[in-house]
Image (tube, rainbow, N blue to C red):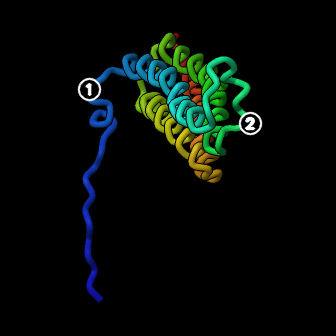
């Protein structure tokens, strides 16, 4: 039996952050999360035009949307619901001066998790949607926990 050893390159947090500071990442992740609220809405617009957009009553069109369009509306609404707690958590980390790698990873994980959440929601992949939601929630909780247990003295 022949054993083959594969060596994968090590990726460090500093490589992922592109040289940005932790405060820049925290504030940037809030801006990215705000933009991600509207990402699913692009699919809503496409679905509305497919369903025969009525500019006089665009919200009344919901029942006529294709299924992916309805899921895009729900992903859009859920993005608002998760934005507020995440913003509070990221600002808490920012204000308390948290600079650990776990804070950076949580901020990055939230943004990636929320992007994937919307994609999996629209594509109707419930297990991956739930996993992505969990990643975003865990990132938010992690930021609160780190900030509140590592307060500057």
Compared with residue 64, is residue 143 higher up or lower down, i.e. above or below?
above
Disc 1: which residue: 19
Q: Quadrant of the N terminus?
A: bottom left
Q: Which mark is residue 7?
A: none
Q: In the picture provided, is 64 more to the left or to the right than 115? A: right
C-alpha distance separating marks 1 and 2: 47 Å
* Residue occupying the point 51% across, 42% down: 116
Q: Earlier in the sequence, mark 1 or mark 2?
A: 1
Q: Quadrant of residue 51?
A: top right
Q: Are marks 1 and 2 in contact (CB under 8 Å)?
A: no
Toward the viewer: 68 or 86? 68
Q: Is residue 126 above or below residue 47?
A: below
Identified at 61% across, 36% down, the residue is: 72
Q: Residue furthest bottom?
A: 1
**In this orientation, does residue 117 appear?**
yes
Residue 15 pos. (x, y %): 27, 36
Disc 1 crowd rating (10 Å Cα; few below 14, some 14-19, many 20+) is few
Give 56 or 113, whichever is nearer the viewer: 56
- Badge 2 crowding class, 10 Å Cα cut-off, few under 14, some 14 to 19, many 20 or more, is few
Residue 77: image location, x then y, percent: 66, 28
Report x, y in % for residue 110: 51, 33
Q: Can residue 138 be seen by looking at this rendering?
A: no
Residue, x 30% and y 23% (percent of image)?
A: 20
| Viewer-side residue, 100 vs 110 | 110
* The quarter of the displayed image where residue 143 is located: top right
**Secondary element at tag 1:** loop
- Nearest-to-viewer mark from 1 and 2: 2
In the picture, the disc for residue 63 is 2
x%, y% of residue 40? 54, 33
> What kind of element bears circle 2?
helix
Residue at x 64%, y 24% (from the top left corner)? 54
How many marks overall?
Answer: 2
């Amino acid at each position: 039996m022949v054993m083959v050893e594969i060596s994968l390159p090590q990726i460090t947090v500093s490589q992922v952050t592109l040289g940005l500071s932790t405060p820049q990442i925290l504030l940037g992740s809030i801006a990215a999360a705000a933009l991600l609220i509207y990402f699913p809405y692009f699919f809503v617009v496409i679905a509305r035009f497919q369903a025969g957009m009525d500019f006089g009553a665009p919200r009344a069109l919901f029942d006529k949307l294709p299924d992916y369009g309805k899921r895009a509306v729900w992903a859009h609404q859920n993005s608002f619901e998760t934005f507020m707690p995440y913003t509070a958590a990221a600002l808490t980390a920012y204000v308390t001066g948290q600079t650990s790698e776990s804070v950076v990873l949580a901020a990055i994980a939230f943004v990636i998790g929320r992007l994937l959440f919307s994609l999996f929601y629209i594509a109707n992949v419930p297990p991956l949607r739930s996993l992505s939601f969990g990643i975003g929630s865990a990132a938010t909780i992690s930021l609160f926990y780190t900030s509140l247990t590592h307060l500057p003295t």
